[in-house]
Image (tube, rainbow, N blue to C red):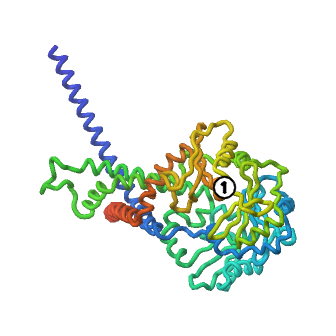
C-alpha cells in the first residue's frame, strides 16, 4: 500500500507540474499574441477613434430629399400637358414604380419614374423620353436649382471619392460642376436623367478625409468593389477584437488590489506601459465593444438576416395590380400647382390612388381627380399593412407621436407621427407607416432589433434620451474616446519601441 500511495503522490505531483507548465505556456502565448497584435493594430485604433470624433460633427456628403425639396424650382403646373398614366406607358413601365414623381428639370416639368428597369424621365410637356442629358442641359438645371451660383463644369466622370457607391450606377457618367457660392460646393448631375444626385461643400470634403473616409475605409479604389470593401472592413477590425480581448484579460491578470506591488501600486508597470495598463482597465470594455460593433457594421458571415420589404409585399400593401391606372386629371394637377409644390408624387395605398403634394415646408395627400385633400385614416393603413403579411395576424397597431427606442432620428430624420403595426409572423415584424404620405417608413424584425443594440447602441450610443439632450451624448462619446485613445496611443508607442528593439 505504501508503494501504491507513493506512486499516486508522484503521479499527482507530475500532474500538477504539467498543469503549471501548460498554464505558463498559455500565458506566454497570450502575452506574445497581444504584443504583436498591438503592434499591428493600435495605429488603426488611433485612426478610428480620431475619425469617429470628426464624424460626430461632419457626416458623409449626400443630396438629401430635404435639400432637393428646398432647392428645386416650383413646378410649372400650367405647362403640364401629359398625364402620369401616359408617362408610364411611354416609359414602358408595367410594374408598380418605387418612385413616380413630377418635378422640374431646369425650366421643364418632367416625370421621374423608377421601376424594375431602372430610372426613366418623361417630359410632362411633350410626352417624349429624356434618355440622355448633355452638359449644357445639366448646367441649366443646376442654374435653376442654384440660381445665384454660376455653375461651371469641371469634368465628366464615372467615379470619384464622393460618388463611389452602387446607388450612383444608373446615373453614370456624371457631370461634375463647381458652384460660385463661396463654399466650394461641387454638384453631380446624372447624364441619364439630368437630376442632381450628389453635392459636397469644400468643408465637407476636407473634414471627410479626416472622418468618414478613413473611418469607413471609403477610399474609392476599395469602396467601388463592394465585396473587396466588405472583406477589408471585416479582416481589419477582426484582429482588433482579439487584441482588445487579450489585452483586457492581461490587464486583469496583472492587476493587484489585495497584494499590491512595491510602493502600494496596483500595476507593475511604469511610463507608457502604465498608461496602457491603467487605460486598458478603465476603457477596455468600451474599446472591445466598440471595435466588435464596428465589425458588425458589415454584417460579417451574414449573422443577421436583415429582412427587406419584398416587391410582392410592396405591391400587396399598395393594393395595385397591372392595368390599374392612377387616374390623375388635369384639374388635380392645376389644384396641386396652387400649393407651390416642388414635387408631386403618385402612389397607391390599400387599393387607393393618391397624389402627394409637397415642398420643403408642407406635405399633403390629395385626391388624384380633384387635387383636394384626401388623407388616409390609420385603420386603413393597418388594413393595407395586413395585406402585406397575409399569413400573419396583427398583434397591435398604434400611432407613435414621440420617438421610442426603436424609432428615433439620428443619421437621418424619421417622420412623426407614424403608425406602428406589430405582426405575429416568425420574424416578429413591425411595420412603421407614415400617415402624412401613406408610405412605408420602416420595417423592423427580431434580427433588426438585436442588431440595433449590438451595433447602433454600442457603436453610436444613440439612445433617444441622449440624442435629445445634447451635448450629453457628445460628452459621453468624447470621454470614452479619450479612454480608447489613451490605450491606443500608448500601444503605438510601446509597439514602436518593440519593433526598434527587435530590428536593432
Residue 290 in the image: x percent, y percent?
A: 42, 55
Instruction: Using a 10 Å C-alpha cutoff, classify the residue at mark 1 as few (fewer than 14 neighbours), some (14 to 19) or many (20 or more).
Output: some
Residue under the image location 60 percent in, 84 percent down: 181
Residue under the image location 46 percent in, 67 percent down: 56
Q: Quadrant for the N terminus, please.
A: top left
Q: Residue furthest left?
A: 263
Q: Quadrant for the C terminus, please.
A: bottom left
Q: Nearer the viewer, residue 374 or 357?
A: 374
Q: Is residue 125 above or below residue 441?
A: below
Residue under the image location 16 percent in, 47 percent down: 258
Q: Which residue lies furthest to the top in this view?
A: 1
State which quadrant residue 223 falls in: bottom right
Residue under the image location 66 percent in, 46 percent down: 385
Q: For mark 1, what is the residue?
A: 439
Residue 144 in the image: x percent, y percent?
A: 71, 80
Residue 502, visible in the rendered structure = no
Amino acid at each position: 500500500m505504501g508503494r501504491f500511495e507513493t506512486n499516486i503522490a508522484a503521479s499527482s505531483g507530475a500532474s500538477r507540474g504539467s498543469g503549471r507548465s501548460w498554464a505558463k505556456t498559455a500565458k506566454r502565448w497570450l502575452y506574445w499574441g497581444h504584443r504583436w497584435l498591438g503592434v499591428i493594430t493600435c495605429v488603426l485604433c488611433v485612426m478610428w477613434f480620431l475619425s469617429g470624433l470628426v464624424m460626430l460633427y461632419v457626416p458623409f456628403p449626400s443630396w438629401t430629399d430635404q435639400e432637393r425639396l428646398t432647392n428645386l424650382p416650383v413646378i410649372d403646373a400650367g405647362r403640364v400637358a401629359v398625364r402620369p398614366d401616359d408617362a408610364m406607358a411611354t416609359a414602358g413601365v408595367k410594374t408598380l414604380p418605387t418612385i413616380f414623381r413630377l418635378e422640374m428639370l431646369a425650366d421643364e416639368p418632367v416625370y421621374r419614374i423608377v421601376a424594375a428597369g431602372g430610372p426613366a424621365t418623361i417630359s410632362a410637356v411633350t410626352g417624349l423620353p429624356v434618355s440622355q442629358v448633355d452638359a449644357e442641359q445639366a448646367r441649366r438645371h443646376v442654374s435653376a436649382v442654384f440660381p445665384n451660383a454660376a455653375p461651371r463644369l469641371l469634368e465628366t466622370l464615372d467615379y470619384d471619392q464622393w460618388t463611389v457607391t452602387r446607388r450612383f450606377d444608373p446615373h453614370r457618367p456624371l457631370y461634375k460642376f463647381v458652384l460660385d457660392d463661396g463654399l466650394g460646393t461641387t454638384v453631380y448631375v446624372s447624364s441619364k436623367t439630368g437630376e442632381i444626385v450628389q453635392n459636397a461643400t469644400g468643408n465637407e470634403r476636407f473634414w471627410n478625409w479626416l472622418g468618414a473616409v478613413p473611418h469607413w475605409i471609403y477610399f474609392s479604389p476599395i469602396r467601388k468593389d463592394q465585396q473587396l470593401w466588405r472583406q477589408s472592413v471585416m479582416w481589419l477590425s477582426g484582429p482588433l477584437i482579439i487584441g482588445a480581448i487579450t489585452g483586457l484579460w492581461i490587464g486583469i491578470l496583472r492587476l493587484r488590489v489585495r497584494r499590491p506591488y512595491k510602493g502600494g501600486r496596483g500595476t507593475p508597470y511604469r511610463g507608457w506601459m502604465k498608461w496602457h495598463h491603467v487605460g486598458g482597465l478603465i476603457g477596455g470594455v468600451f474599446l472591445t465593444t466598440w471595435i466588435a460593433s464596428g465589425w458588425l457594421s458589415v454584417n460579417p458571415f451574414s449573422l443577421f438576416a436583415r429582412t427587406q420589404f419584398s416587391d410582392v409585399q410592396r405591391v400587396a400593401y399598395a393594393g395595385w395590380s397591372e392595368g390599374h391606372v392612377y387616374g390623375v386629371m388635369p384639374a388635380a394637377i392645376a389644384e396641386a400647382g396652387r400649393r407651390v409644390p416642388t414635387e408631386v408624387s403618385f402612389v397607391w395605398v390599400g387599393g387607393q390612388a393618391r397624389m402627394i403634394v409637397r415642398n420643403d415646408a408642407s406635405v399633403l395627400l390629395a385626391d388624384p381627380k380633384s387635387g383636394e385633400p384626401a388623407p388616409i385614416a390609420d385603420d386603413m393603413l393597418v388594413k393595407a399593412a395586413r395585406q402585406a403579411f397575409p399569413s400573419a395576424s396583427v398583434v397591435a397597431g398604434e400611432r407613435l407621436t414621440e420617438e421610442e427606442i426603436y424609432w428615433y432620428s439620428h443619421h437621418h430624420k424619421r417622420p412623426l407621427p407614424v403608425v406602428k403595426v406589430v405582426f405575429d409572423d416568425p420574424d416578429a415584424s413591425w411595420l412603421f407607416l407614415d400617415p402624412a404620405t401613406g408610405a412605408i417608413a420602416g420595417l423592423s424584425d427580431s434580427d433588426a432589433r438585436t442588431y440595433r443594440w449590438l451595433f447602433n447602441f454600442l457603436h453610436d450610443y444613440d439612445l433617444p434620451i441622449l440624442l435629445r439632450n445634447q451635448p450629453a451624448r457628445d460628452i459621453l462619446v468624447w470621454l470614452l474616446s479619450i479612454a480608447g485613445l489613451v490605450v491606443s496611443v500608448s500601444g503605438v508607442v510601446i509597439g514602436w519601441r518593440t519593433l526598434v528593439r527587435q530590428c536593432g
